Image (cartoon, rainbow, N blue to C red):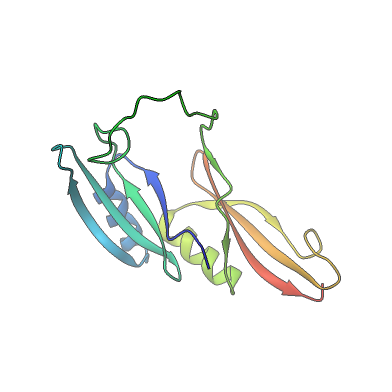
Amino acid sequence: GLAVKAVGITVESAKEAYEQVTANGGVGVLPPTEVVGADGVKTTIAEFKMFDDVVLRFIEPCEAPFLPSYTKLDSPPLTYGLTRIDHIVSNVPKLLDQVNYMMRATGWHEFAEFTAEDVGTVDSGLNSMVLANNDEMILLPVNEPTRRT
């Protein structure tokens, strides 16, 4: 089915972020790599495994509108006032294994926790732990399905 394969976050140094997560047990997928567009604009990206085939992508800011070779189009401003990430959900088979891996690799902390009693029906539900970065501008809920709650 359709799913997100990469969650990108802007960081000052993709190299430092990658080195930190891999030193803390994160599984590296793409070491720091310079991306150069046809326009000569450069940036560095790096990735580590979040779960399954989904990666967290570290992206350094660049001079282009988004990434090298992206071109700004004349159009009305496309903004909805978003200033932070608040809800990129991961559904995993083993909640604690995933949460412990992500917290160890990134240094993020538990922001909230919900159980099947909070989010469940007679037939199904979920356990959820929400991870946050230090300034809590990024929230990543991690869910584990439950049955017969």
Reply above or below: 106 against 2: above
Residue 71 position, x and y percent, is 28, 34
Q: Is residue 69 left or right of residue 107?
A: left
Reply above or below: 139 against 74: below
Q: Is residue 3 left or right of residue 36?
A: right
Residue at the limit of the structure toward the front, as seen here? 74
Instruction: Determine the image quadrant of residue 53.
Output: bottom left
Q: Is residue 136 visible?
A: no
Q: Is residue 95 left or right of residue 122?
A: left
Instruction: Determine the image quadrant of residue 105.
Output: bottom left
Reply above or below: 16 against 94: above
Residue at the limit of the structure toward the right, as seen here? 122
User: Where, quadrant-wise, is the C terminus in this rendering?
Assistant: bottom right
Q: Is residue 42 visible?
A: yes
Q: Residue at x 28, y 38 (%)?
A: 70
Residue 125 position, x and y percent, is 76, 67
Q: Residue at x 81, y 63 (%)?
A: 117
Q: Residue at x 27, y 43 (%)?
A: 13
Q: Is residue 37 left or right of residue 146?
A: left
The foreground one among 26 and 59 is 59
The foreground one among 66 and 99 is 66
Instruction: Determine the image quadrant of residue 72.
Output: top left
| Numbered-mark total | 0
Residue 24 position, x and y percent, is 36, 62
Q: Residue at x 71, y 66 (%)?
A: 126
